[in-house]
């Protein structure tokens, strides 16, 4: 049987970094990455595409659209795609691609590393090998593969800044593991016969994390400058009421000006449930806000950017927000 055809897309990140005078910077192309693991040619035929060479701190929603566009243009030619990416914003890109390329029957795998590929101790080679192993498999859709874990693209979060065990799957089980070159599958992601591609994102989405005593002027400012505001509140969710009407009125004014407001939680696991406490139930009952439930903040950001790239109609925005895409939301309204 013919070996599968894989496209390795380079975007930068630590995996491709070299040490310079001012620290690590992405220098290596995807072709140069491949030279470190020549044995990959035993399991597939790999072609390379270098889209950009960025520390992922500099990756923006427009770059997600470029990656999605590159995959779209070459979708027929390849059996699977591997995107080598910086770890810092990889969870956002994984979520972004999950919305821009929906229902892909072919695997689209993001990976990267905590240590550059040229270092003596590095996770780069193993992560790339594992990513290619998933890319030649019959796993479907956008996934993040790191330290042996296979994570649904909408569920990934960077939870460790230094160790190899850098990513977790939030509020959703792992799709599987890669061990010694073999996939142990826990879940088979759903796919369509053909993927649906999108190419527009609206980056005018802001995120505000509440802290005790936070001034609601920040929320007003962010609402003025953006089309949507995500408020990461406490616990299962709510807005401060210590100054009567303060947050409530700010959010109400934003909504009346046509902005979208999503309430979520800064607690990593188990999600929001605004109905539980008075501080949440009154805004949920009285205002047309949206609630993230079990979605990750990364997925909420990316989903809003995708939705607002398609429509500004509030009803349609709400409909799309609560419609599950790539298992991003389990709990419902
Ligand atoms: N700063 C790097 C990046 O995100 C970190 C990494 O790749 O691990 O591009």
Image (tube, grey):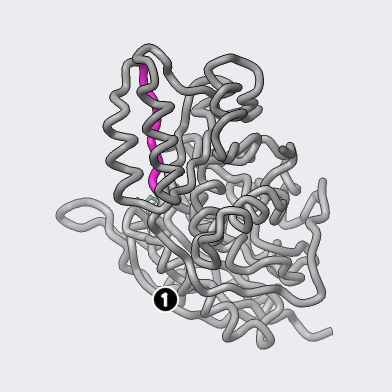
Image spot of residue 25 (x, y percent): 28, 59
Look at the image and tell me in which quarter the C terminus lies.
top right
**Residue 5 x %, y %:** 68, 81
Left or right of residue 71: residue 27: left
Image check: 62 left or right of 42?
left
Residue 115 percent coordinates (x, y): 41, 49
Asked if residue 130 shows in the view, the reply is no
Q: Report whether the residue tagged 1 is closer than 8 Å to ligand 1.
A: no
Q: Nearer the viewer, residue 8 or 303?
A: 303
Q: Crowding at label 1, few (<14), some or many (≥20) Cα neighbours within 10 Å?
A: some
Residue 191 in view: yes
Q: Which residues are magenta?
A: 206-212
**Position of the N terminus by quadrant:** bottom right
Q: Residue at x 40, y 42 (%)?
A: 254
- Between 159 and 234, the one lying in front of the other is 234
Residue that mark 1 sits on:
51
Judging depth in this view, the residue of 190 and 5 nearest the camera is 190
**View extreme (left): residue:** 21
Q: Quadrant of residue 31?
A: bottom left
> What SS does tag 1 mark?
strand
Residue 211 inside the magenta-drawn segment? yes
Name the residue located 55 percent from the left edge and 38 percent from the top edge: 289
- Residue 294 lies, in percent from the top left, at 65, 36
């Amino acid at each position: 049987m013919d070996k599968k055809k894989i496209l390795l897309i380079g975007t930068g990140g630590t995996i491709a970094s070299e040490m310079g005078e001012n620290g690590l910077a992405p220098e290596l192309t995807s072709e140069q990455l491949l030279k470190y693991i020549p044995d990959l040619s035993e399991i597939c035929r790999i072609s390379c595409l270098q889209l950009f060479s960025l520390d992922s701190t500099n990756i923006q929603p427009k770059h997600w659209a470029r990656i999605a566009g590159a995959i779209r243009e070459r979708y027929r030619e390849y059996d699977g795609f591997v995107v080598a990416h910086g770890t810092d914003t990889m969870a956002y890109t994984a979520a972004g691609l999950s919305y821009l390329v929906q229902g892909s029957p072919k695997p689209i795998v993001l990976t990267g590393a905590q240590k550059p590929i040229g270092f003596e101790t590095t996770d780069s080679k193993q992560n790339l090998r594992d990513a290619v192993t998933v890319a030649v498999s019959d796993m479907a859709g956008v996934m993040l593969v790191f330290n042996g874990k296979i994570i649904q693209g909408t569920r990934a979060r960077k939870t460790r800044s230094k160790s190899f065990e850098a990513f977790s799957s939030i509020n959703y089980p792992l799709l599987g593991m890669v061990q010694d070159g073999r996939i142990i599958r826990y879940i088979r992601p759903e796919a369509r016969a053909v993927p649906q591609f999108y190419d527009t994102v609206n980056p005018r989405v802001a995120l505000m994390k509440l802290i005790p005593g936070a001034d609601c002027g920040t929320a007003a400012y962010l609402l003025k400058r953006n089309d949507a505001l995500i408020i990461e509140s406490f616990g299962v969710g709510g807005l401060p009421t210590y100054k009567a009407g303060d947050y409530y009125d700010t959010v109400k004014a934003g909504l009346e000006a046509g902005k979208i407001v999503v309430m979520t939680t800064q607690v990593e696991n188990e999600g929001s449930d605004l109905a539980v406490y008075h501080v949440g139930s009154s805004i949920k009952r009285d205002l047309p806000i949206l609630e993230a439930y079990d979605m990750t903040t990364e997925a909420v950001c990316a989903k809003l950017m995708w939705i607002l790239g398609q429509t500004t109609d509030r009803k349609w925005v709400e409909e799309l927000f609560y419609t599950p895409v790539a298992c991003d939301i389990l709990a419902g309204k």
